[in-house]
Amino acid sequence: STTMRSILHNSAKDILLRQARFFSSGAHDTVGFIGLGNMGAAMAGNLIKANKKLIVNDMSEEAVSKLCALGAVAAKSPADVASQASTIVTMLPAGPHVLEVYTGTNGILSKVQPGAMLIECSTIDPDSARKVASACEAKGSDFVDAPVSGGTIGAQNATLTFMVGGEEAAVARAKTVLDLMGQNVVHCGGAGTGQLAKICNNLVLGITMAGVSEAFQLGLQLGIDPKVLATVVNSSSGRSWSSDTYNPCPGVMEGVPSARGYSGGFACDLMAKDLGIAVSSANSVKSPLPMGSLAQQLYSLMSAGGNGHKDFSGIFEMLQRAKK
């Protein structure tokens, strides 16, 4: 009937007007980012390159200033971020920081917008991830734990892999943002499973970096050119990410921490923390972790020597000094 056609026409018109107001406001392009360390700053930078309006927060004023120089807007607190952005990415050092940023007095959940998309990219213990997921769900927000792999190089080049835990619909929604910062988004299962995958991945990484460092240190002592050794290893069964993409021996590769005194990159203290989570998780299910436990001790030893702030590939430097 004419009346029904008129109702449908007006309804469609209202929907189009609401969409127009939404898109003209730029709300769909506003993303909050909390945690601007070596990884977070590079990831946030890629969102700016993708023309997202970015609202940032970090304890470091210098880190915030650098992002603001690229076009970001500074927020006073996580709550301030939440009041302005309906999509928020967090990249923080450890579980306690994540819990505080989400559930603290000035945390995200104190001012979160209805139906917000919350993406937690830190590497933390699975239990903390599940606690945050439950708190977000209680507030009516979508939440995924989405830890990353690929290091600072992957963060800079937007080639990261995201290991994502959460409901399928939330993961699909988060993927539109994650795709701007990486090239692989893997749905691992329910809340916390992204962290489980990351723990296992970093267990392999920590062990292989120690092994590659030992092998290249031995090669140097025996008199083989490390670049020649790299060519052999990287075309043989010893090849790994630690040898062909992030080699710990100075002079083998450019653009990696070993080429700049192990500055930047993924801090030794963070690797020791991740391996600690792996060891603790293994103990909880009585799974033996002899190699992982030894690797954790090596990075703890490096940290105790005053080098916890250096990239974890500095384990090579520690071994070199031990020889002297």
Image (tube, rainbow, N blue to C red):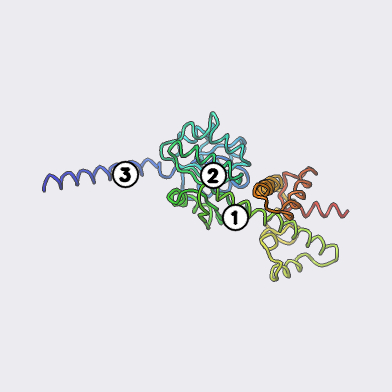
Residue pictured at 45% horizontal, 48% vertical: 170
Q: Which amino acid does label 1 sit on?
A: Gly
* Type of the residue with mark 3: Ala
Residue furthest to the top: 105
Observer-nearest residue: 4 or 227? 4
Please name the residue that numbered disc 1 is placed on.
154
Give the labeled residue for mark 3: 20
Residue drawn where x is 74% and y is 55% of the image: 291
Left or right of 101: which side holds 222? right
Q: Which mark is residue 120?
A: 2
Q: Position of residue 182 (x, y in %)?
A: 53, 54
Callout in the foreground (1, 2): 2
Residue 265 seen in render: no
Are circles 1 and 2 on residues that touch, CB within 8 Å? no
Q: Name, please, the residue furthest toward the left.
A: 1
> Dot 1: few (<14), some (14–19), or many (≥20) neighbours within 10 Å?
some
Q: Residue 223 carries which label?
A: none
Circles 2 and 3, Cβ within 8 Å, touching? The answer is no
Residue 96, x across and y down, in percent: 62, 37
Q: Is residue 178 left or right of residue 264?
A: left
For marks 2 and 3, give the one nearer the viewer.
Answer: 2
Q: In the displayed structure, would residue 243 be above or below residue 278?
A: below
In the rendered image, is residue 239 in sight? yes
Which residue occupies 15% across, 46% down? 4
Q: Are marks 1 and 3 in contact (CB under 8 Å)?
A: no
